[in-house]
Amino acid sequence: MIDVYEDPGEPDVRGGWRYLWWLVRCQAGRSLAGAVLSTVWMGLLAVQPYLMARAVGDGLLPGRTGVLAGWTGAMFAVGALAAWVSIMRHRTMTRVRMDANFRTVKLIVGHTVRLGAVLSRRAGAGEVVTIGVGDVQTIAVALTAVGPGVGSLMVYLLVAAVLFSVSAQLAAVVVLGMPVIALLTGPLTRRLQGVETAYRDRQGVLAARIGDLAAGLRVLNGLGGKGLFADAFRADSRELRDRGYRVGAVASWVQAFGLGLPTLFLAVVAWLAARLTAQGTIGVADLVAVYGYVAVLLGPVAFIVEVGYELNRAVVAARRVTGLLRIAPEPDTGTLPAPSGPAELYDPGSGVRVPPGRLVALAAARPADATAVIDRLGRYGPTDATWGGVRLDAVPLADVRARVLVADHEAGLFAGPLRDILASGPERERDFSEAELARAVHASAAEDVVRGLPDGLDTELAGQGRTLSGGQRQRVRLARALLADPEVLLAVEPTSALDAHTEALVASRLRAARPDRTTLVVTTSPLVLDHADTVLFLTDGKVRAAGPHRRLLVHEPGYRALVARDTGDAEGTEGTEGDVLNGVAGQGSSGTTGATKPSDPSELSELSKPSRPSEGTFAGEAGR
């Protein structure tokens, strides 16, 4: 079975059937062993009717007790051997299924990691979830065809050959029976592929809708849109249910034919054998053997039909897997060397310049404009941005990722100990020290988060930090980014979910946490903007003004209206600098008053001291 560290290989993604065959070829020896063991097992089962016929014909009817005992002992020995072979067959086929499962999972996980930011643009979250939850298991189960499936076919042919020694008429009926069953079930299995594909596609859409609802439920409650989205979800659920009924209807007919047709087919064989016995064409012992063969064939024939059903479902699942695996990462054609040291980032599309070693803030009238700038500067899409005069897309992507980090305020948080979550940045040759962890936690004002957990940094957190509040998750993300200590940090709204007091702490500590490092922060919070070396005011995707936060407040009415939530006429009288600053003192990212920015080092020092917050502080943030 594939090892956790083993290379899963290069899959054949040209189609569903090709991918299934590739999984078989990846474990050809084990698949062959499963087929041989299954054939031997079913063959031993088929031998029992012959032994029973001999016991009846040679021992029971003539009254030869010793001969009867001998054939009975042979039947017991063959049965014991069949039981042992069945155990080995089951163990082998379990390994075949698990190998296919793990190999497919490794391929999907590895490919999604390589795709990175491309994945969310080319495939929905629901698609990935349904592939991982349902399709992988469907593919693994279908590989049973290489074991019992092959064994059933071989035993079917073996029994047909043995019946030729009893009656050519019976053998002909057995040989022709399977093609008739295949003709009757073939159209249904093809129909099953179509309805199963439609059902799986719709299932992916619904899974994506569930994810959207779960992620935005608080926002929907605040906007009053929960009912609207709930109605849409109910409509999608009804449609999925109806498609599920169609799948179930076709599947029920396939399964009914898989059990009913073989039973009727073998009943015909038994009836013919009885007629031939009554006519004296075959003997009583032969009749007993034929009945035994009929009983043995019930399993293989039904299983052959079942394998066809499972393979058709697996092809649908494999097509979805290969569709995901065919998504290609963004081409990396970069060959030029990255700047040897800190260098300026420049986006010609917007005019944004980020000098090395400076703390720059980007305030955008439209958040989408700022996101587009960050995507270009972080090379998360087509870009003509430059880094030290060299186009970013001309530098190998690995070099860009090693030195430029985009820290999104909604970035994913994996489940695990908080210590590992914080240290999940770029790989290092050594573990992060306690001092490094403490500095990152302090800079992000997350000491109270750590103190509030039962085991501190070693506390196990759920995926996406669901046990934390929104503000706590945001500070954990910021601490993770600061701990990675990239040469260039592009932080998107790192304090948007924080209360004004905590935001003031983060704003005051961010500069000290990254001395001589390049930092670009997307924000409209006056508390953060006031600490930036330069603020870039972005309107209609272009830099309209640049300068210190306080100067822009006085001379740019549009900027003042954006960051200060000025209710007056943005184009009216500018006023004096003191009037403007006094009018916006204490406003945080939400525009509420009540938390003033420290104006001297002593006040800043007091705010920066780590202390356990009161219950009121936790209660104020818990609802965020």
Image: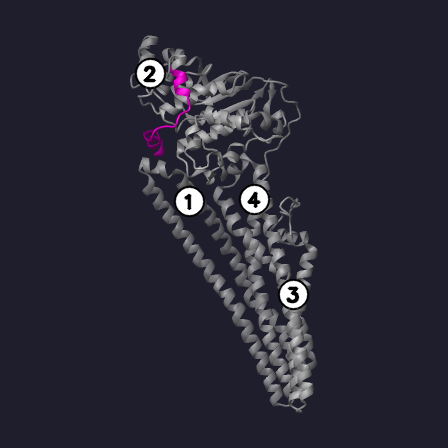
Q: Earlier in the sequence, mark 1 or mark 3?
A: 3
Nearer the observer, disc 2 or disc 4? Answer: 2
Whether pointer 2 and pointer 4 mark residues with C-beta atoms closer than 8 Å, the reply is: no
State whether residue 424 is above or below residue 504.
Answer: below
Mark number for residue 38? 3
The residue stretch that appears in magenta: 603-624
Mark number for residue 324? 4
Q: Amino acid at mark 1?
A: Ile
The residue at the far top in this view is 576
Q: Earlier in the sequence, mark 2 or mark 1?
A: 1
Does residue 246 belong to the magenta stretch?
Answer: no
> Which image quarter holds the C terminus?
top left
The answer to whether residue 414 shows anywhere in this view is no
Q: How would you rate the neighbour count of disc 4 (Cα within 10 Å): few for under 14, some for 14-19, many for 20 or more?
A: many
Quadrant in the picture for residue 601 = top left
Under tag 1, what secondary structure? Answer: helix
Q: Earlier in the sequence, mark 4 or mark 1?
A: 1
Mark number for residue 210? 1
Nearer the observer, disc 4 or disc 1? Answer: 1
Quadrant in the picture for residue 39 = bottom right
Q: Amino acid at mark 4?
A: Leu
Q: Earlier in the sequence, mark 2 or mark 4?
A: 4
Q: Nearer the viewer, residue 179 or 240?
A: 240
